Image (cartoon, helix red, strand yellow):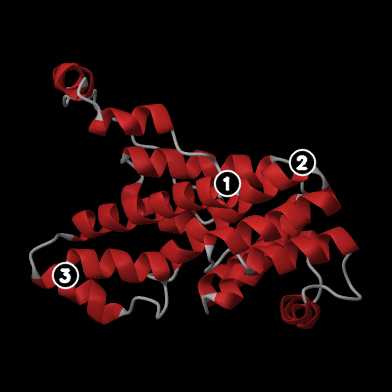
Amino acid sequence: VLSEFVRALSQSNPRPAKREYDALKSIGLSDKAVAEVVALTVANCFGNRAQTISAAPPNNPMERIAASPWRVLFTPLMKIFFSPKALKPISPGSAGGFMGDLIVPIADHPTGLWMRKTVDDCFASEVISPRTKLFMMGIVAKGLNCGYSAAASFRELGEKAPSRAEFNDILDSFGVGILPEEDQALLRWIRKTIRYLPIAVQRDTEELMGLIGPDKTVEAIGTAATINMMVRMAMLS
């Protein structure tokens, strides 16, 4: 039941529904435990996208250890270095801020603290304008049929918001005739990060880099990872 829920949330095709949530409760998980499962699942979605989209190479020397005759020496060392250690109590984090309602259930969890900082840092950076990132979030929200995230991105635009009708037109047309060419490219590209074949999204990212340059591409990858994480979390709200 747990693995089915995690797979459904990660792939979101189809999106998880209340019946999957109820199934977790039926096997004895508390609301707090379910919140932790959701948080860890979407945090791994962040890592998978950041690594896959950027075509980060595997750590081959580390992976070869498993097949090496020297593993009999490394195994005891690994147990020492990676054995569970007592953790200091966590100071409750602030769930306030953009998408803060989603972080409330895990505000005192390490993943919640990391998530709050990740979202804040993402939308504070201006390598790609925060306004463009909110349109990017709207595209992912539309692709995953998440009304919560679409409404949140529109509200966060504040004084920079177009009319609601124009906002919807941007999501429908990827900003053609409304936004600059770079923004249009980012909206088309992030739509492809919702579900993808690794080689295809890596080629799309290389093409994007040719248009917007390496710095903005690095920021786009981090933004896509952050947005896909939060929208998947929001689908359960």
Q: Type of residue at label 2?
A: Pro
Image quadrant assignment for residue 218 = top right
Q: Residue at x 32, y 79 (%)?
A: 17
Distance from the alpha carbon under mark 1 to that under mark 3: 32 Å
What label does residue 154 carry, if any? Answer: none
Q: What residue sits right under mark 1 in the picture?
A: 55
Q: Mark 2 and mark 3 in contact? Answer it, CB < 8 Å.
A: no
Residue 38 is situated, as x and y percent measured from the top left of the image, at 32, 58
Q: Nearer the viewer, mark 1 or mark 2?
A: 1
Q: Is residue 45 left or right of residue 5?
A: right
Q: What residue sits right under mark 3 in the picture?
A: 1
Distance from the alpha carbon under mark 1 to that under mark 2: 14 Å
Q: Earlier in the sequence, mark 1 or mark 3?
A: 3
Q: Type of residue at label 1?
A: Ala
Q: Earlier in the sequence, mark 2 or mark 3?
A: 3
Q: Nearer the viewer, mark 1 or mark 3?
A: 1
**Is residue 189 in view from this perspective?**
yes
Instruction: Judge the density around disc 2: few (<14), some (14-19), many (≥20) Cα neighbours within 10 Å.
Output: few
What label does residue 214 carry, if any? Answer: 2
**Is residue 155 in view from this perspective?**
no
Instruction: Judge the density around disc 1: few (<14), some (14-19), many (≥20) Cα neighbours within 10 Å.
Output: some
Q: Is residue 78 left or right of residue 138?
A: left
Image quadrant assignment for residue 107 = top left
Q: Secondary structure at mark 3?
A: loop
Residue 209 is situated, as x and y percent measured from the top left of the image, at 77, 49
Residue 82 is situated, as x and y percent measured from the top left of the image, at 22, 24
Q: Secondary structure at mark 1?
A: loop
Residue 221 is situated, as x and y percent measured from the top left of the image, at 63, 49
